Amino acid sequence: MLPGAPDPNFTPFMLQRKSAPPIHEVRQLTLPKPELVHLDNGIPVYILDFPGQEIVKLEAVFRAGRPEEEKRLASRATSRLIREGTLNKTAAELAEHLDYFGASLNVPTNLDTSSFILFSVKKYAEEVIPTFAEMLLQPAFPQEELDNFCRNSIQELLVELEKGETVAYRKVTELIFGEHHPYGYNSMPDDYQAIQKADIQHFYQKWYTPKNCLLFASGRIDSATIKLINRHLGQHKGPDTPDRKTIISSSEHPNGKKIKVTIPGSLQTAIKIGRRLFDRNHPDFNGLVVLNTLLGGYFGSRLMTNIREKKGYTYNIYSTVDAYLGDGCMYIATEVSPDKTSAAIRAIFSELKKLREMPVPEEELSMVRNYILGMLLNGLDGPINSSDMVRNQIVEQQTPEKFEALVYTVRTISAEQLQELAQRYLQDNDFWVVTAG
């Protein structure tokens, strides 16, 4: 055969476009077990060491959220302003230093906790971890930055209040939890105007203490990195953290009703249909994860298939179960044209009725099982995702056994058990219906 001539025995590979690839069951799901060490001042550090990864992720978590507030928005204002300058560096100098060494800082929003996440390449850990520690331990809370925060937050809020989706969410959570509940109150411009520097300093001194701090380190975390963390975060001595207030959660869920909020000029109507539930420790929580996924928790869900694909009422619709440290809720959300609002609401409640009255077909249930297990597997992929999973478990006071219980429920829950949960938690009268538009 001449060089470059085609091989007469070669059979070209043909893509099988008419048949889907085989689906393999997710078999091994094990939450990684972090190594636990304590700094000199007692701060626990949960370590996931990945020697082959030249990155360092360091996260500090403080139980300093809305339930700890004495004044509205104190938790949010404190966490936002901690990165806006220290006793020795301005906000610009902090940002410039981290940028120079290719590091980044995230401050995610959470109702229960305040978190500060540092990402860095391993070789520059000695340059950026001291700066990270300085930010946490020596915040200056400059008055100018507080004024900017309040002014910008009020402007952002006014813009958000023109959106039906935002208005509906704020209203439904207020109805579910109560307007004075930590998870239910809505921030207003007056709340931002009332925040003073003294409020932030008081909140910081009370809750940003070593005894109220958890550290999570992942990536390439060797002994030198641990010593570095201890040198800069383990020597600070703080006051004892006071006892936390107990969140009052009524076991009686008030009957829902329909609330309409008018937004002049709105071209769409936002719909939020929600009810109160419970935290992750409730015995029915794991089953509700599966039930919610069936209803509206993924692209092939009942709500998406019927209300988006078949009826064409909306581009997007979903349901979610939100679990907090002291409570929880479930809600369904979508946006439709005003003339389809009533029909969409009827269609949503029709899907709830079907789940109450008819067992889920095994093929559909199998698809949902695989989807949830696949999402859990993705959450265990790599140092960043794994650290998030471990962080969530520890912060939410869960255990590896509870993670295993979730996996077991996903694998084994029956159609009959899901129907029983639907009959218990998807009754029409338990839901608030909020429309905004």
Image: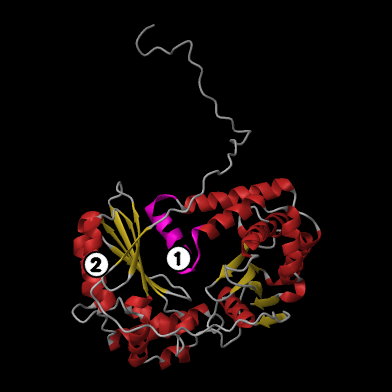
- The Cα atoms of the two marked residues, 1 and 2, are separated by 21 Å
Crowdedness near tag 2: few (<14), some (14–19) or many (≥20) residues, C-alpha within 10 Å: some
Q: How far across and how far down the image is residue 53, in percent? A: 30, 49
Q: Quadrant of the N terminus?
A: top left
The verdict on residue 143 being magenta is no
| Vertical comparison of 327 with 195: above or below | above
* Residue 354: quadrant of the picture: bottom right
Please state which amino acid type lies under the numbered disc 1: Ile
Residue 363 visible to the viewer: yes
* Span highlighted in magenta in the image: 381-400
Q: Label 1: state its secondary structure.
A: helix
Q: How far across and how far down the image is residue 314, in percent? A: 66, 62
The verdict on residue 389 being magenta is yes
| Vertical comparison of 361 with 120: above or below | above
Q: Which residue is mark 2?
A: 230
Q: How far across and how far down the image is residue 347, in percent? A: 75, 64
Say whether residue 426 is left or right of residue 212: right
Q: Main secondary structure of the magenta part?
A: helix
Q: Quadrant of the C terminus?
A: bottom right
* Residue 386: quadrant of the picture: bottom left
Q: Residue at x 29, y 54 (%)?
A: 55
Please state which amino acid type lies under the numbered disc 2: Asn
